[in-house]
Image (tube, helix red, strand yellow):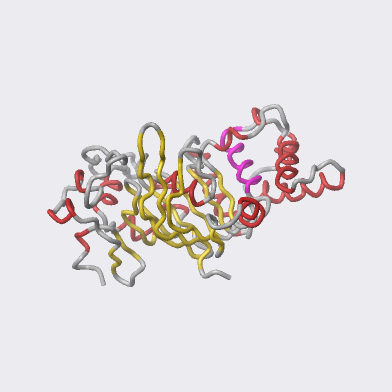
Amino acid sequence: MAEHILEVEDLRGYYRGVFGVVHAIDGVSFSLDRGVIMGIAGESGGGKSTLAQLVSGTPPPLLHHEGGRILVDGIDIYNIDPEELRTEVKCKRMSYVPQASMESLNPVKRIRDFIFDVVGQRTRRRVSSSERKEEVLEMATSHIKALGLDRSVLDRYPHELSGGMKQRVVIAISTLWNPKLLVIDEPTSALDVTSQKRMIKALLNLKQVGIIESMLYISHDLTSLKQLCDECMVMYAGKIAEIGDMDGTIDDPLHPYTRLLIAAIASYDSRGKKTCKLECIPGSPPDLRSPPPGCRFHPRCPYVMDVCRSREPGMFMVGDGKRGASCWLLTSKSG
């Protein structure tokens, strides 16, 4: 058994088209331990969703795996044939729930019939006999209930469900084969606050009942990340800005970008009074067709030094080596 459920080594993924070459993921390395939920944070365009697509082995047509390795449960997913990726990795070891996945449900089929189609396609064996259908429904029911839904959901059409219910149905279907790793992208972005809380509770329960082992959770919402995740990785312009435990990242951020990202979140007390001044990050993210030299955050950083403009910082680890940031300010703190 591999030590980590997920290992990413010097990953590079570029979009190529008439618009040029976009360095969307550029030299990303990290690992995810078994039993850990890791959140990926950052503003739009930072590479979060692109990373999820590469890690899950489902890059869209214009996104190319340029280099680096991705090991899922010890299997190098870009060094095996597509059939082995389909049968040995996807669904079995890893499942991916992309953004807006609730719209993937067939509007003219009941949930149970849609599940029969999915299972039939996955196993390449049509679900037609009554015994086989009952077996699939029992499997689906356990996952539906783990996500806080009633079995009656299986008899409904998508339009009869709320957005949060549809999202949980999709997650239930994606985890039917009890994958060790769930990669999920912005599952709460289209939900109201109450539905967001239900979603977070449901995802935690998936892990507690043993349906999944680990999770890579992508979100721009630091509040939901703090409620759900053990560890956090902050991305900026296709690179890792900071990585470490969730509480430490929020309470004592190491990278200037992380500090500004947290400062841009409104905070209120029990009476609804704002408790801190709301700040914004100056400037705009760089054009990744021609990234700036040195640190990619230096054009917006309030602490920029000469070295930041010319040399790209590595990942400087601090303390016990479990937290780190790509910032020259940490050279005196790193071990």
288 or 249: nearer the viewer = 288
Give how far across and how far down residue 189 sits, in percent. Answer: 46, 38
Q: Quadrant of the N terminus?
A: bottom right
Q: Is residue 19 magenta?
A: no
Whether residue 200 sits left or right of residue 166 in the image: it is: left
On screen, residue 262 versus residue 144, left or right, reads: left
Q: Quadrant of residue 221?
A: top left
Seen in the picture, residue 69 relative to 224 is either above or below; the reply is: below
* Residue 229 percent across, percent down from the top left: 45, 56
**Which residue: 80% across, 42% down?**
126
Question: Does residue 279 appear in the picture of this structure?
Answer: no
Is 171 one of the magenta-colored residues?
A: yes
Q: Camera-side residue: 152 or 293?
A: 293
Q: Residue at x 54, y 57 (%)?
A: 79
**Rendered view: 185 above or below 334:** above
Q: How many marks?
A: 0
Q: Position of residue 238 (x, y in %)?
A: 35, 48
Quadrant the C terminus occupies: bottom left
Look at 75% across and 41% down and name the residue there. 116
Q: Does residue 51 sit above or below 79 in this rendering? A: above
Q: Is residue 5 visible?
A: yes
Q: Secondary structure of the magenta portion, mostly?
A: helix
| The magenta segment | 162-174
